[in-house]
Image: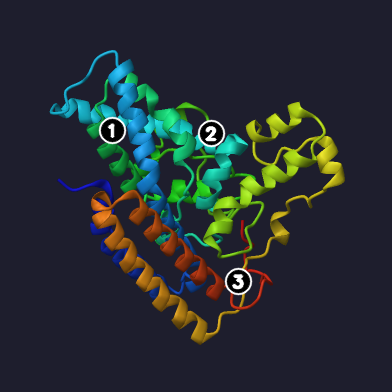
């Protein structure tokens, strides 16, 4: 039986082929949504997430299995179709609340922000995932263990929910009528990724958008107000390590400068962007203004682009080998391989900085 990482390896060529197809379609339509530096950064963060997941999933699945064995009210049969359907619906419901929490609680946003840092929106953005989400995300799925969903069923529906969300990260698919009313769709998810006041912190659903309609977090994409992508505290880097640490570092810095211990706790539990008055006064940050946002796009020479692409191809090959054989490797071998791949991804990021930290303004609409 295939392991979860092996399924990802088999799916990777499909992901890359669809990314290539979207790129070609965008060129043909005169609506290219790709930049090499940003795409490599997004896919690289997905690679890093999968590598980190080799360690994190042992933690999350282990805790889930323990809760299932000790706390389940009843252990549901893993061979009944209705259990699988109920588990998928239940997982998507729990995912909605995890995703909502990821936008409304600073500590959870510190992990989830990675997915939103790209100032482009395309299929490579779907692969841009956090490497630290496993630390707290498992808490939101414990109700499924208590209700008796077997670990094997849980792990499978989690993968299905994740894979579904790949295709909605595109600007090449428009409104889909009735489908948009029930499901997370490209239109609905574009609004979710936008930083415009109208769209920010909306449309959290993974497969179903019904949860957002039920709990008051739904908004429709409006053609009169184009989506602007990114985060309100832009990363300004293609470094995958910096991407994963950005919000944690900001929270730690504000916690260090806060004079009240209560405020130090609140910083991590309040919505992202909240700061104690004393910290905001001593360490002011400019107010967010959509019209003044610039896209980070340092110039990239041809030689650097070619070298970064070749190194990235080697990283993809190495990651595929690691994921396929991970279950056969000792802990030390696994850790050494993971560190080597992270170092290579950092090198790709350094190359795509293009020797400049200067951000370049977006042509047309500003970036989130």
Task: Identify the mark at residue 297; answer none if there is no mark.
Answer: 3
**What's the colour scheme?**
rainbow
Q: CA distance from mark 1 to mark 3?
A: 40 Å
Secondary structure of residue under mark 3 = loop
Neighbour tally class for label 2: few under 14, some 14-19, many 20 plus, Cα within 10 Å = many
Circle nearer the N terminus (1, 3):
1
Q: Nearer the viewer, residue 180 or 170?
A: 170
Determine which quarter of the picture holds residue 151: top left
Circle nearer the N terminus (2, 3):
2
Q: Nearer the viewer, mark 1 or mark 3?
A: 1
Secondary structure of residue under mark 1 = helix
Neighbour tally class for label 1: few under 14, some 14-19, many 20 plus, Cα within 10 Å = many
Q: Position of residue 99 (x, y in %)?
A: 48, 37
Q: CA distance from mark 2 to mark 3?
A: 31 Å
Q: Which residue is mark 1?
A: 154
Q: Position of residue 35 (x, y in %)?
A: 50, 71
Q: Position of residue 94 (x, y in %)?
A: 40, 30
Secondary structure of residue under mark 2 = helix
Circle nearer the N terminus (2, 1):
2
Q: Which residue is mark 2?
A: 101
**Residue plotted at (27% across, 29% down):** 87
> As drawn, is 285 to the left or to the right of 99?
right
Task: Identify the mark at residue 117; answer none if there is no mark.
Answer: none
**Residue plotted at (51% across, 66% down):** 346
> As drawn, is 289 to the left or to the right of 165?
right
Q: Nearer the viewer, residue 261 or 227?
A: 261
Query: Up-down: is 85 above or below 183?
Result: above
């Amino acid at each position: 039986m295939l392991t979860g990482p092996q399924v990802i390896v088999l799916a990777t060529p499909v992901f890359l082929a669809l990314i290539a197809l979207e790129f070609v379609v965008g060129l043909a339509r005169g609506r290219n949504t790709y930049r090499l530096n940003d795409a490599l950064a997004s896919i690289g963060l997905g690679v890093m997430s999968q590598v980190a997941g080799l360690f994190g999933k042992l933690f999350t699945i282990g805790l889930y299995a323990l809760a299932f064995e000790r706390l389940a009210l009843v252990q549901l049969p893993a061979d009944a179709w209705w259990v699988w359907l109920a588990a998928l619906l239940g997982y998507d419901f729990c995912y909605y609340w995890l995703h909502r929490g990821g936008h409304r609680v600073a500590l959870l946003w510190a992990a989830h922000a990675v997915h939103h840092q790209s100032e482009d929106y395309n299929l490579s953005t779907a692969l841009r995932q956090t490497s630290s989400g496993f630390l707290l995300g498992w808490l939101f799925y414990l109700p499924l263990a208590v209700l008796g969903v077997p670990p094997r069923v849980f792990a499978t529906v989690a993968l299905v929910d994740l894979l579904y969300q790949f295709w909605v990260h595109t600007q090449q698919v428009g409104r889909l009528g009735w489908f948009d009313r029930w499901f997370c769709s490209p239109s609905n998810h574009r609004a979710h990724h936008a930083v415009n006041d109208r769209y920010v912190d909306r449309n959290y659903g993974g497969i179903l958008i019904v949860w957002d309609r039920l709990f008051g977090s739904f908004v429709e994409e409006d053609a009169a107000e184009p989506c602007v992508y990114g985060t309100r505290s832009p990363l300004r880097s293609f470094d995958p390590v910096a991407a994963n640490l950005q919000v944690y570092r900001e929270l730690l810095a504000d916690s260090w400068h806060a004079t009240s211990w209560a405020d130090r706790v609140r910083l991590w539990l309040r919505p992202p962007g909240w700061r104690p008055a004393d910290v905001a006064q001593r360490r002011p940050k400019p107010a967010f203004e959509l019209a003044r946002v610039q896209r980070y796009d340092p110039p990239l020479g041809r030689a650097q682009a070619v070298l970064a692409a070749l190194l990235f191809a080697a990283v993809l090959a190495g990651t595929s080998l690691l994921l396929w054989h991970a279950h056969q490797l000792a802990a030390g071998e696994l850790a050494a391989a993971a560190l080597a791949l992270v170092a290579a991804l950092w090198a790709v990021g350094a190359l795509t900085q293009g020797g400049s930290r200067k951000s370049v303004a977006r042509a047309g609409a500003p970036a989130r």
